[in-house]
Image (tube, helix red, strand yellow):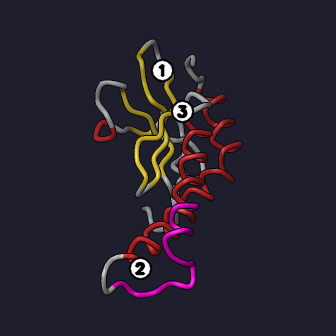
Amino acid sequence: MGLFTLPEARLEVARLRPVLDQIITLRADMVELSAALVPGGEPTPLGGLPERKAVEARLNELMTEVQETGAELKGMAPLLVDFPGELDGVSVLFCWLEGDTDITWYHRADLGFAGRRPLPGAGRHRSPDAG
C-alpha cells in the first residue's frame, strides 16, 4: 500500500474506530478467558475454551482488517496503530495510540515509538489523565 497523508490517516483512524474499539473489548475478553483456563483460574461468565477460540479468531479478523488498510498494527496493550507517510520529505509514521481521540503524534520510520513527537501545530487530544 502507499503512503498516507496526514488527513488520510486521520480519516482512516476515524473510519476504523469501531474496529479498534472492538479489538480493545475483545482483548480484555481474551485475557479474562485465558486466565480462567489456567489450572486454578477463576471461572468467568464469558465461557471457556470454545469461547476463547472464537474471540481469538475474531481478533485475528479485526487485526487483518486494520492491516489491509495499509496501517501497521504495532502494539496490542495499549493498542498502537501507525500510518506510513511523509512529513517535510522525511519518511514518518503517523501514530494513533489507544486513548487518543485523533492522530497528533508522529515519529521517523527509523526511530520507532521512542522517537514520537507531537505533530507541528497539533493540539494534543489525549485522554483526560494526560497532562
Cα distance, mark 2 to mark 1? Answer: 46 Å
Q: Mark 3 — residue?
A: 71
Disc 2 is placed on an element classified as helix
Residue at 62 percent across and 58 percent down: it is 22
In terms of depth relative to the viewer, which is nearer, 112 or 44?
Answer: 44
- Point out the image quarter for the N terminus: top right
Task: Give the mark nearest the N terminus, 3 or 1.
Answer: 3
Dot 1, how many residues are within 10 Å of its Cα: few (below 14), some (14-19), or many (20+)? some
Q: Mark 2 — residue?
A: 36
Residue 78, x across and y down, in percent? 42, 56
Q: Mark 1 — residue?
A: 87
Cα distance, mark 3 to mark 2? Answer: 33 Å
Residue 89, x across and y down, in percent? 45, 12
Which span is picked out in magenta? 41-55
Q: Which mark is drawn over residue 51?
A: none
Three-letter code, disc 3: Ala
Above or below 14: residue 53: below
Cα distance, mark 3 to mark 1? Answer: 16 Å
User: In the drawing, does residue 117 fall left or right of residue 98?
Assistant: left
Residue 52, x across and y down, in percent? 51, 66
In terms of depth relative to the viewer, which is nearer, 119 or 34?
Answer: 34
Residue 37, x across and y down, in percent? 39, 76
* Residue 46 sits inside the magenta stretch: yes
User: In the drawing, does residue 15 fall left or right of residue 95?
Assistant: right
Residue at 48 percent across and 20 percent down: it is 87
Q: Are marks 3 and 1 in contact (CB under 8 Å)?
A: no
In terms of depth relative to the viewer, which is nearer, 70 or 106?
Answer: 70
Three-letter code, disc 1: Leu
- Point out the image quarter for the C terminus: bottom left
User: In the drawing, does residue 10 fall left or right of residue 103?
Assistant: right
